[in-house]
Structure formats: structure tokens, C-alpha cells
Amino acid sequence: MAVPMLSRFKAPGTTLRPKQEFAILFAVMLVIASGNTGLISLMPVISRRLDLPDVALAIAFSCSSLIWTTSAPFWSRQIHPRGSRQLILGGLIGYVCSQLLCALTLGLGLLGIIPPLYAFAGFIASRAIYGFMGAAAPPAAQARIALHTKPEERTNAMAMFASAFGLGTIIGPAMAPFFILPLIDYAGSPIIFGLFGLITLIAVMAKLPDNDPIDYDLQPASESYPGVGNEPTDASIVIATAPPSTVKLRWRDPRIQPWLLAGLIGGHAQAITGMTIGFLVLDRLQLPPDQAQSLIGLVLMVGAGAGLLSQWALIPKLGLSPRQMVLFGSLISAIGLLFTAHVTNLHAIAVCYALSMLGFGFFRPGFTAGASLAVDRHEQGDVAGKVTAVNGAGYIIGPAFGMMLYGLSHALPFELAAAAMGGAILVTLLRVQSDRD
């Protein structure tokens, strides 16, 4: 029996079944997300093995985030003239090239064949490729789903599609340690993840048909940068269902400014902690880097699972308003982050970090929904773009700033992030009226 929400998910003139095409697009997001987060989970150990400054790693990811944030709007505009299939292929090609270049340069560095500085330069280049070309695939896949689903079915279809990223944040850190192979060492993980991307690329080339150019009315928001423990918000869902509008919202519009400010604060807090948690596991457990790798992956996997638990199970059951979600999520995150800053054993680190991610799982969709509900329907596209920009902003400055703080004190990034979530609570209490929920 066909899934109702996918009953129209079919390109005109093709015989591909709706569920098959959706599965291909789902696999695209899953592969990209798992490879990205799997690599992030390995980098604390690789950085220490190469004797690089901890902040250097964060700078590399900040540069990638900046490139992603600036290139994603360009790719979104290319969906209409080029069609979604070409952009999905281009994004996958960029992802595969990025993973393989990363494996080559870091592998040569770890084996002592090239100096660590050269390996780091190659890593920056690989992340730049990912930031530029990888940003093309997610909005194109979203637009394809929007084109082939009924308006009343689109939100559920988009939510199911976005869950692929959440699954990737669990699968990537869980699988990465298994791909640390003899002879090629840590280079094995990006090679294997790159091969998964190549298989997905072949599937797209063979099975995903060409489609008519996407109508501008269905053009989605660009994806914000995919960092550790965060999944796409509903901004792309909102804009995919929104009618076109020439109205431009001001950033200081009093209806949305409090929501965006809270989102900006919380986004930086999550980016800071997502980048530093792997190093915290290394230093608190005082294990050799190679022995700590699987434990880092475990902590990241538990944190990502807690975030999905809130969005898949708790939010639908509790029926909280956006304001309540932001307040509750901020409080839970602040408590988890404060404990994470000071606990010293693996079990406590994993539980406390998971608690903070559980809170972020409430917080992110809360401020997204709040901003969306604060404006009229014809303004939804504009507010979704602003939400996406806010989500991406935290990953431009947050990782590098967090690692600078970590160099001063291992607890400081988590204490500052907890204080930031307290600031998000104050902004919401003082600036968002409860009768708007």
C-alpha cells in the first residue's frame, strides 16, 4: 500500500515508484550527514595526533561554515534554471571529492609522509569543497519533494526527509571508529564514507529521473550548516509551502526580532559545545587519543539521539507552545551544560551532554515555529530565510570561539554556553508575550 504523503511523489513521465524516489533522496541526506558528523567525531584525535593547535580545527570548520552559508543561497537560486537532479549530483560529487581529499591529506600527514601543516592545509581545502558544493544537494532535494507532493502532505513529507539528517548525526559517529583501518589508519573513515557517497551518486544517476525546472513558488530555504548534534529546523518546510511575496521583513521587526535573537544566542551555544565536547572527553578521561576515539563517538551519538527523542517523541506528545518550547529547552540545556562543564567520568559526560542536546531539541524548533507564527502567510518565505541565516551564523564564529575558550579552561565553553541559554530565557520572558503563543 502506498504511503499517502508520497502518493504524488513522482516526476512527470517516469515509471519510478514514489517510495523509491523518496528513498533515494532520503539516502542523499543520510549519507552527507553521516559522513560529515563522522568526520567531525574523528577530528579531535586526528588533531592531537598531528600535534595541531586545538583552535586550528575549529577554524577549519568555521571557514567551511562560512562558505556553506554564503554559497547555499546561490545554489537555491540555481534550482529553477537547472533542475533539482543536476544540483543533487553536483552536491554529491562535491561531498565525495571532499571526503577523498580529506582522507589523502590527513592520511599522508598521520603517516609522516607530509608535514602536519601541509595536511592541515589539505583538510581546509577539502572542507572548502564540501562547504561550496555540498550546499547544493539539500535544498535541491527539498525542492523536488515540494514539487511532487500535495500542499496538505508537504509538511509531513519534509519532516520525514529532514529526519535523515538527524539519523546521520547518530550513524556517523557510531560507524566512524569501525572504519579506522590497518595501514591507512584514520584515513579509512573518510574513504569509506566517500565510497558510500559514490554509491549514492551512482544510484541518483541511474534511478533519479530528470524533472521539469522547479517553480519559484516551491523554492526552499537554503540549509543552515550541518554541525554536530543539530538537525535542520522547519524553516525549509515553511518556505516550501509559502506563497511568493515581494514583502521584505526587517531584521528588527518587533514580531520576529525576539525569536531571532533567542535563536542566535542558542545557536552559538550549541555550536560552541558541539565543537569542544570531543576534546573534553579526551582530556577528562586522560586516555591516549586512539583509545578515546570510540568514546567520543559514543558521547556524540547519545547526544544526537537525545535531540531526536525530543523532536520525534516528546514534542508531539507534550503539545507545548513555541514560547514554552524555547523556555523549557533553554532551561534543560543550561542545566545539562553546567553539569557537563564539571563532571569527570564517561557516564556522567554522556548523560549531561545528552541532557543539553535534549534541551536543544526543544529549543530549535521552538524559536523557528515562534518566528513563523508571528508573521502572516505571505511573509513566511522571508522569515524562513532569516531563520536559516540565524542557524548558520552560530557555526561561523562559534566553533573557533569555543576552542579559544577551551584553551583557557576546559569548563569555560560549557559554562558560557549555559549562561547564553540563560540569556535566551531572559529574552523570551521579557520580549515574547505569552498571549502570542
Image: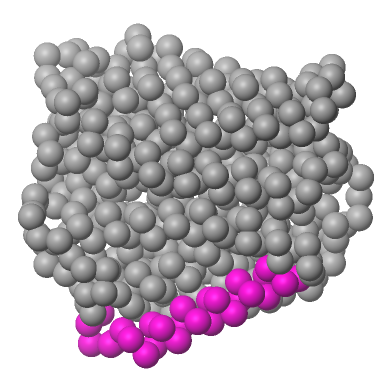
Q: Main secondary structure of the magenta part?
A: helix
Q: Nearer the viewer, residue 66 or 206?
A: 66
Q: Is residue 2 above or below residue 248?
A: above
Q: Is residue 52 above or below residue 1?
A: below
Q: Residue at x 35, y 25 (%)?
A: 88
Residue 193 visible to an observer of this rendering: no
Q: Magenta includes 369?
A: no
Dividing the image into 4 quarters, which one contains the N terminus?
A: top left
Outermost residue toward the bottom in this view: 430
Dividing the image into 4 quarters, which one contains the C terminus?
A: bottom left
Res 174 quadrant in image: top right
In the picture provided, is 140 more to the left or to the right than 27?
Answer: left
Q: Nearer the viewer, residue 351 or 75?
A: 75
Res 380 quadrant in image: bottom left
In this rendering, the count of numbered labels is 0
Q: Residue at x 27, y 69 (%)?
A: 251
In the picture provided, is 54 more to the left or to the right than 123?
Answer: right
- Residue 57 point in image, percent of width and height: 69, 45
Q: Is residue 241 above or below residue 417?
A: above
Res 83 quadrant in image: top left
Q: Residue at x 31, y 84 (%)?
A: 432
Q: In the image, which residues are magenta? A: 411-437
- Residue 235 point in image, percent of width and height: 30, 54
- Residue 338 point in image, percent of width and height: 68, 76
Q: Residue at x 49, y 59 (%)?
A: 394
In this picture the colour scheme is one colour
In the picture provided, is 26 more to the left or to the right than 208?
Answer: right
Q: Is residue 189 above or below residue 394?
A: above
- Residue 302 point in image, percent of width and height: 64, 53
In the picture provided, is 34 more to the left or to the right than 251?
Answer: right
Q: Nearer the viewer, residue 218 or 97?
A: 97
